[in-house]
Amino acid sequence: MKERTREKIALIPARGGSKRISGKNIKIFCGRPMIAWPIEAALESDLFERVIVSTDDDEIAAVARKWGAEIPFKRPAALADEYTGTDAVFIHGLKALNISMGYACCIYATAPLIQTEDLRRGLAILGNTPATSVFSVTRFSAPIFRALQSSSNGRLDMFWPEYRMKRSQDLPEAWHDAGQFYWVDVEKYLMEGRLFSSNSYSVKLPAWRVQDIDTEEDWSRAELIFNMLRNKNGS
């Protein structure tokens, strides 16, 4: 018997009240509101039945609707402070939509460098492995096993002194969350309640295509990368 096609939705968390960069989610980035870029990537991928934005902010909601996203619910204030994690927001959205099965992708509103091909790669991995989640990662720019810590008196110590004599090429590769998207098998995810688990798989991205945007300097660098990609693709 042929397996029933799984519904696929994209959910983009975008709260108001950003402190480090005011109005970050709708600030103009390379000619459009920041949130427009991930919305467009999700829509153009043709992967999703619905592209939804979870927000507590009416202005963000209006901008998101203008660029093609749905706003079927308003996020409660208790889940819109700077301490609320992605899991809580994602799970709230799935429950608000009454989705208990299928595939869902949490896409960050401040991920303008996201590529539709990476979303497709993530979905393929989710569908062909026992994964609960699949998310974007990138390699650390320097070997973390050579990391140093500074004591209160200024003295330096290694976190892992046992690796002091190891050559860089002999050290294990280390990766970190690229902060772009998280695919989940909804049924498994709601049971586990966390994006990172023993059943997490990865989509590996080159470091130059990853930028966490928390400062004005980050913003400027992300725009440079974005424009370089746009020129490369001829768009």
Image: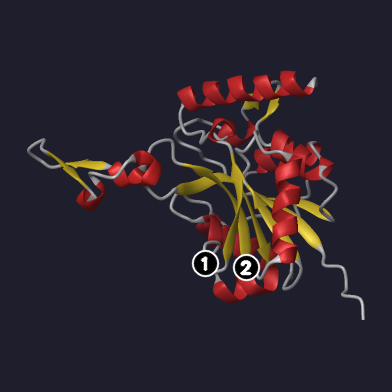
Q: Give the x, y percent position of residue 231.
A: 73, 18
Rendered residue at 35%/40% (across/down): 168
Q: Secondary structure at mark 1?
A: loop
Q: Which mark is residue 132?
A: 2
Q: Are marks 1 and 2 in contact (CB under 8 Å)?
A: yes
- Please state which of residues 24 and 156 is positioned toward the viewer in this rendering: 156
Q: Residue at x 72, y 50 (%)?
A: 121
In x, y percent, where is residue 31? Answer: 71, 21
Image position of 169 (left or right of 212): left
In the rendered structure, which amino acid carries the disc numbered 1? Answer: Ser
- From the viewer's side, name the closer residue of 97 and 219: 219
Pick out the residue farthest to the left. 153
User: Which residue, given by chain and number where applicable, does mark 1 sit on?
Assistant: 197
Q: Is residue 73 visible?
A: no
Residue plotted at (59% across, 46% down): 204
On the question of residue 93 being in view, the answer is: yes
State left or right for residue 87 relative to residue 32. Answer: left
Q: Earlier in the sequence, mark 1 or mark 2?
A: 2
